[in-house]
Image: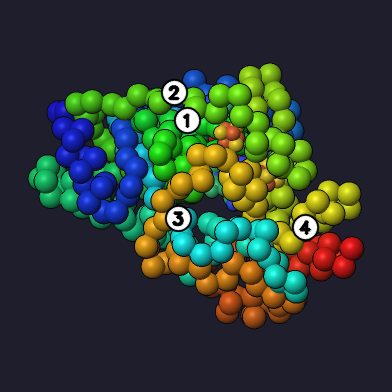
Amino acid sequence: MTFAAHSVLTAAFAEGFELAGLTPARPHPDHTRHLSWVSRGLAAGMFYLTDYRATLRSDPRLIFPEAETLLCVGKLYKTPGPAGYTETPPGHGYVSRYAWGEADYHDLLGSALHRVAARLRAEFRSEFPYRVAVDTAPLLERSYARSAGLGWIGKNTCLINEPRGSWFFLGELFLPFPVSDYGTPPPDRCGSCTRCIDACPTAAIVEGPEGWELESNRCISYWTIEARQQAPPDLQRAFGPHLFGCDICQDVCPWNSKAPTTSEKGFQPRHPFPPLEPLSPSEFRDRFRHTPITRAKAEGWNRNVQTALKNQAE
Ligand code: B12
Ligand code: SF4
Ligand code: SF4
């Protein structure tokens, strides 16, 4: 049985997603790019990208065998508030925009996707099986979202939407039925612009065999969120006040100059500029419970605080 694409998209918009599109749950041609990127060591220490899960990324049905369709959604997270890391006050560090709020986007988008599924089950009168993913499954999220029509992949490797920019999270609902229409990828609108490449303080956006790509070993976001060890000293100096993640290659993107903001309560800024002070494991837990920052763990957070303090003293 084939279901109306319109009904699925309407359910997604009704649950607060600003972007939604549909694409077949089939192997994606970008998978060869992923394998090539991994094989050239650009994933740094992120073993979840390089182990058996690199192969799982070849086909969504390896994660959810009944999958026929992927509903790809985007949820805006830009809030009115500080302009970015350039405003960091002395004695404080910078947390990237996506982690400013008190909600963890995995939970927020995940619950909304379950509600989309509940709406569809009621509308189609079927208890069909489904699966939800928000950065939680070995899936090429940007590639499928591009195919579903949500945006193009910029030179900074982010998915960018015209006119909304790139300050949005991605999530997916794996559905066990085909739909009447699927999305098509929009054109690449980067043109001759190179602002993100020029602005990256660590030269982490590099030219690869198939175009621009991210060298995680040089990316501030990698070092301040994912890495479990200290970055090389010459690189650390380029981190400036960054404590968790990095927004520079999106802050400078012209497509973000008029990006809309969200009124989502859980994303409103609570800690964009935390004080540069080390925290005990329990202080860290209490301060950042349920936020994406917990990923760095207290040890990583304190390492980042030391780096930012050193950079501020220089
Ligand atoms: C690992 C990871 C990281 C790593 C590596 C990032 C990277 N660029 O690969 C690190 C820790 C550095 C990172 C940083 C960030 N991340 Co991250 N990350 C992921 C994760 C878990 C996997 C990405 C991955 O597979 N990378 C490997 C590369 C090879 O794959 P890819 O980036 O998807 O690239 C594919 C396409 O770009 C494609 N391609 C096709 N056509 C074209 C054309 C061009 C021009 C290019 C460049 C590529 C391209 O080829 C690739 C192979 O499929 C995804 C969630 C997911 N499951 O996808 C989130 C995700 C990509 N991250 C996200 C976010 C928000 C961020 C940060 C903004 C957080 C921050 N503020 O610090 C930064 C952005 C840094 C940047 N410039 O990318 C969002 C991105 C949303 C968006 N609008 O694009 C995602 C989708 C999570 C989510 N569910 O919302 N991240
Ligand atoms: S997130 Fe920061 S360090 Fe990483 S590529 Fe973008 S500007 Fe460079
Ligand atoms: S800054 Fe320019 S080149 Fe980089 S992603 Fe944005 S439009 Fe593309």
Q: Earlier in the sequence, mark 2 or mark 4?
A: 2
Query: What kind of residue is marked 3?
Result: Tyr
Report the front residue among 81 and 285: 81
Within 10 Å of the Cα at label 1, are there few (<14), some (14-19), or many (20+) other Cα atoms? many
Q: Residue at x 28, y 38 (%)?
A: 175
Q: Report how far apart the C-alphas of labels 4 and 3 lie in the structure.
A: 24 Å
Q: Report how far apart the C-alphas of labels 2 and 1 lie in the structure.
A: 7 Å
Q: Earlier in the sequence, mark 4 or mark 3?
A: 3
Asked if one can make out residue 273 in the rendered structure from this viewpoint, the answer is yes
Q: Residue at x 59, y 48 (%)?
A: 251
Within 10 Å of the Cα at label 4, are there few (<14), some (14-19), or many (20+) other Cα atoms? many
* Residue at the spot of label 3: 77
Q: Are marks 2 and 1 in contact (CB under 8 Å)?
A: yes
Report the front residue among 153 and 263: 263
Query: What kind of residue is marked 1?
Result: Trp
* Residue at the spot of label 1: 152
The answer to whether the residue bearing label 4 lies less than 8 angstroms from the nearest atom of ligand 2 is no
The answer to whether the residue bearing label 1 lies less than 8 angstroms from the nearest atom of ligand 1 is yes
Q: Earlier in the sequence, mark 1 or mark 3?
A: 3
Q: Quadrant of residue 77?
A: bottom left
Eyeballing the image, is 64 above or below 167?
above
* Tag of residue 240: 4
